[in-house]
Image (cartoon, rainbow, N blue to C red):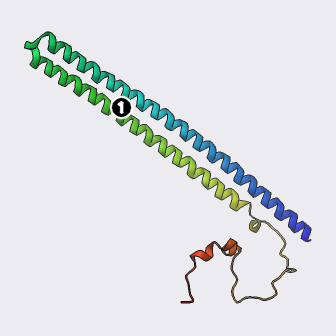
Amino acid sequence: MADAFLEKATSALSEAKESVATTADSVKASLTDAEKTVATSTETARSTLTEAGSTVAASAETVKTEAAAAPEKVSGVSTQARDAVDSALSRGIEGAKSLLQTFEEKRTEVSSKLVGAVSNAVGGASSSTVANRDLPVSTDNQPLLASGETTPWWKNCCGVLDLFKKDTTS
């Protein structure tokens, strides 16, 4: 009877390990996708900023050329330069807004993938625990001294939760 219990417990543990491994792989794949998305978005931002810089440089060069060639048209050139700078800035701002929107969409997508993966891990692990199976209860190995209160196994695990207990002796 103990062998059958041990086999069922071993089987349940193996299933839980497989579920956790599968979930870990899924989370790893989600993180890899997120890294690729961030890298692509970063490259897009760099090219947008480079293009805006080139536009501003070209506009500045145009202003310099026209100002040197025709001093009498300085006020007209000044207006053209202002328009060129305004145009370049508005394109840069629009590009930044677009990039920010893309980042927000990808962040939401990555967050939902991570929440789904963690939910699968928790759901997979809890559905394959020994407590949910029809295992026989043994009375062979009962403790010699019965305490006044029973504590679930997870509260005693490695003494981790003892760190959070309130000190009742003082």
Percent x, y for residue 144?
82, 87
Residue 40 vs residue 116, the one in the foreground: 40
Answer left or right for 166 relative to 23.
left
Q: Quadrant of the N terminus?
A: bottom right
Answer left or right for 104 relative to 89.
right
Q: Residue at x 56, y 47 (%)?
A: 113
Q: Quadrant of residue 16?
A: bottom right
Q: Determine whether 55 is above or below 114 in the image.
A: above
Answer left or right for 127 relative to 57.
right
Percent x, y for residue 103?
44, 40
Q: Residue at x 31, y 33 (%)?
A: 93
Q: Determine whether 29 is above or below 53 in the image.
A: below
> Residue at label 1?
95
**Identity, as a three-letter code, of the amino acid under mark 1:** Gly
Residues packed near mark 1 inside 10 Å, few (<14), some (14 to 19) or many (20 plus): some
Answer left or right for 26 relative to 73.
right
Percent x, y for residue 128?
74, 60
